[in-house]
Image (spheres, coloured by chain):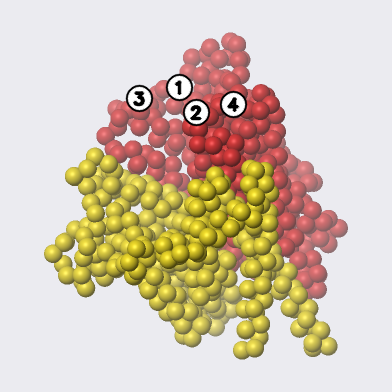
């Protein structure tokens, strides 16, 4: 009965969409990186940077827009480090990401303490407010679900459509996908594989940073340690679950967003199950969904493998390293 | 053999340079905060190493990192990215608490080993899930272990609020570990406990197994080239699953050492991020068991010294994460550059 009540309320669907947006942004960004052949497990750290510096930017500039810009930039900057390490220095991409995530946790929590000390009543920054669609917002049920959201929700939806268009219908998208599937072919066609990968990774950082800002600036307008709480990892899982397509990834993030919205409601309803199980719910749901609803599928063939121009030309080696770097899923 | 010593020396140089760079970059934050980096690092060093109490405290903090780091190093050697030490450590701690806080009539020689074994079993089983899913169903262990981390930590959180809760208190905590299941203290006046022997023993055994046995050769072969290992007739799947279980068992043991040797009570979020920090430890240790021990002691000292630095100079403890992260990134980058240098020299020598 409780469940039925939750599922018939517009508020649940409104919250599900709102909670999906941080993941949607990060996963869409991550998709660029993964299609270009660079695993980005650093999404978590990039989101964390975005959530903190977005908050800080909005707080000091009194402008949400500037906050969002700074969030995207801080995520992009960390992505640049990931790109340098995994593309230029050719370090294992999963291992680099471990360092990246730790760096983000260190920077955000240290700078936070240095600025605010141990004062727990820290300042609230300006945050995003729902867009006013006038009459549309007054439509029963659907009005609250679709036309009572913060602007970033609509930006995210446009970005997904844009990502889909770019990846599958433009030359540049073709280059990105080729960099992930068959970098040698791209190289022979005279396109700089490393440059394509750099751009893709930085895009993933920009969007992950924006996704982080969506956590801090759409309601709570404040920051605490490790506020993203693994959302970057979930975004990473959503890309796999969505089989490396823009729309599939978007649907996968919606599953997690709905899980989180459900979790919050079940807690509020005093449902007779310990709250820890609700906190577990989004992660368990993602795991179960991965195991039971998705057969093993393959990621981009060259994903996880650094591209070495000289070697590729000299020995015509296929990137077999991909299979041991965890790219086959 | 000569080449091996050369490699080790090279790696030590790389690690040393990485630490210098990390301390150098972190000093910008100290200067921004208004501290003198020299004074700050002196406080860090003093808090970490000067005096028996500080030294003992550093080692105590190093123990869980050491055991979990050894497990991670083993898994990485087999080419399997066990990011799940956090969850495995929590479940290991829970299992050790279940056994260690009950059965007070058991003699020490049975009770303590039983509690330790329970932690290994719990950590190993938790690691078996992603291992099985990877080998049999082809799922990426990175994703499954991360998801299992959150599930495991929340489950332990639940346990101290329900079936493991001490009925004598209102706080969400387990009953205390009975003395018969506690790891004995090694030095009076310090928290250093017999867990140190477990850590060192595990490192030595792992070193011997990895480098002197067929199974260890198999692990390294599967890790460096799975296809070649399969062609050579090795059962790569079985090697991966066993490796994963041993890796999880070590992480579970790390949780047990924390509870049975030091805290003597299970609390929620009792050891946040240890499982992730242990990844950094394994990497800094160059995925070598003995290197991992050294790296764990270094990280433990860093963490312990940072507490002193915070008390004396008001510098947040979290700066340790920045230092750790920069060390990891630099070690990765420098060792790649170093390898290029060595290859170049070799080529020169041949010509």
Q: Nearer the viewer, mark 1 or mark 4?
A: 4
Q: Are marks 2 and 4 in contact (CB under 8 Å)?
A: no
Q: Which of B15/A325 is in front?
A: B15
Residue behind mark 2: A121
Quadrant hosting residue A24: top right
Chain seen in yellow: B
Residue behind mark 4: A125
Q: Nearer the viewer, mark 4 or mark 3?
A: 4
Q: Which of A114/B236 is in front?
A: A114
Element marked by disc 1? helix
Residue B283 spot, x, y in % from top left: 57, 66
Chain seen in red: A
Quadrant hosting residue B201: bottom left
Same chain check for tags 4 and 3: yes
Counting residues from the N terminus, which is met first, the one under dot 1 or under dot 3? 3
Residue B157 spot, x, y in % from top left: 34, 46
Please give left or right for residue B108 compared with residue A165 in the image: left
Counting residues from the N terminus, which is met first, the one under dot 1 or under dot 2? 1
Residue behind mark 1: A10
Same chain check for tags 1 and 4: yes
């Amino acid at each position: 009965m409780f469940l039925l009540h939750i599922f018939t309320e517009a508020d649940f669907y409104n919250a599900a969409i709102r909670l999906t947006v941080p993941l949607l942004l990060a996963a869409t960004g991550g998709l660029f990186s993964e299609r270009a052949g660079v695993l980005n497990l650093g999404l978590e750290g990039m989101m964390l940077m975005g959530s903190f510096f977005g908050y800080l930017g909005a707080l000091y500039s009194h402008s949400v827009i500037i906050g969002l810009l700074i969030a995207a930039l801080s995520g992009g900057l960390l992505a640049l480090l990931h790109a340098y390490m995994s593309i230029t220095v050719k370090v294992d991409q999963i291992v680099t990401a471990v360092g990246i995530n730790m760096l983000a946790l260190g920077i955000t929590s240290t700078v936070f303490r240095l600025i605010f000390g141990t004062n727990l009543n820290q300042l609230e920054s300006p945050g995003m407010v729902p867009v006013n669609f006038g009459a549309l917002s007054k439509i029963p049920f659907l009005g609250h679900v679709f036309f009572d959201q913060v602007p970033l929700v609509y930006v995210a939806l446009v970005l997904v459509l844009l990502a889909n268009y770019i990846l599958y219908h433009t030359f540049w998208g073709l280059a990105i996908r080729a960099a992930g599937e068959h970098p040698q072919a791209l190289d022979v066609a005279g396109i700089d594989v490393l440059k394509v990968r750099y751009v893709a990774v930085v895009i993933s950082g920009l969007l992950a940073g924006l996704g982080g800002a969506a956590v801090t600036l759409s309601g709570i307008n404040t920051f605490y340690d490790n506020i993203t709480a693994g959302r970057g990892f979930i975004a990473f899982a959503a890309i796999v679950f969505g089989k490396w397509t823009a729309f599939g990834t978007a649907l996968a993030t919606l599953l997690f967003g709905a899980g989180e919205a459900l979790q919050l409601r079940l807690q509020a309803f005093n449902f007779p199950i310990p709250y820890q199980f609700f906190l577990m719910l989004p992660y368990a749901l993602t795991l179960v969904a991965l195991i039971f609803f998705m057969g093993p599928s393959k990621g981009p063939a060259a994903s996880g493998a650094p591209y070495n121009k000289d070697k590729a030309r000299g020995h015509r080696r296929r990137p077999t390293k991909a299979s041991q770097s965890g790219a086959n899923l | 053999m000569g080449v091996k010593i050369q490699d080790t020396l090279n790696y030590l140089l790389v690690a040393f340079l990485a630490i210098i760079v990390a301390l150098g970059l972190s000093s910008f934050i100290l200067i921004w905060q208004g501290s003198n980096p020299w004074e700050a690092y002196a406080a860090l060093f003093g808090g970490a190493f000067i005096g028996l109490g500080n030294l003992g405290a550093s080692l105590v903090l190093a123990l869980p990192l050491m055991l979990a780091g050894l497990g991670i190093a083993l898994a990485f050697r087999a080419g399997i990215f066990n990011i799940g030490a956090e969850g495995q450590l929590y479940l290991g701690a829970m299992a050790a608490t279940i056994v260690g806080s009950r059965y007070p009539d058991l003699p020490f020689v049975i009770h303590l080993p039983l509690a330790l074994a329970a932690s290994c079993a719990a950590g190993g089983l938790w690691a078996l899930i992603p291992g099985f899913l990877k080998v049999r169903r082809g799922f990426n262990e990175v994703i499954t272990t991360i998801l299992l981390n959150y599930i495991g930590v929340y489950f332990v959180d639940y346990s101290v609020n329900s079936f493991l809760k001490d009925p004598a208190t209102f706080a969400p905590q387990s009953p205390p570990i009975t003395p018969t299941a506690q790891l004995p203290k090694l030095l009076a006046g310090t928290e250093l406990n017999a867990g140190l022997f477990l850590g060192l023993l595990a490192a030595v055994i792992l070193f011997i197994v990895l480098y002197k046995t067929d199974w260890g050769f198999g692990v390294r072969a599967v890790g460096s080239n799975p296809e070649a290992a399969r062609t050579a007739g090795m059962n790569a799947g079985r090697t991966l699953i066993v490796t994963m279980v041993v890796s999880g068992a070590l992480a579970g043991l790390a949780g047990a050492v924390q509870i049975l040797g030091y805290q003597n009570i299970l609390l929620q979020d009792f050891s946040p991020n240890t499982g992730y920090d242990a990844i950094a430890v394994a990497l800094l240790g160059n995925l070598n068991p003995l290197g991992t021990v050294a790296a764990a002691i270094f990280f433990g000292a860093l963490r312990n010294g940072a507490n002193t630095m915070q008390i004396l100079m008001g510098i947040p403890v979290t700066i340790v994460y920045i230092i750790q992260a920069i060390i990891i990134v630099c070690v990765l980058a420098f060792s790649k550059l170093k390898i290029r240098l060595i290859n170049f020299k070799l080529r020169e020598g041949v010509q």
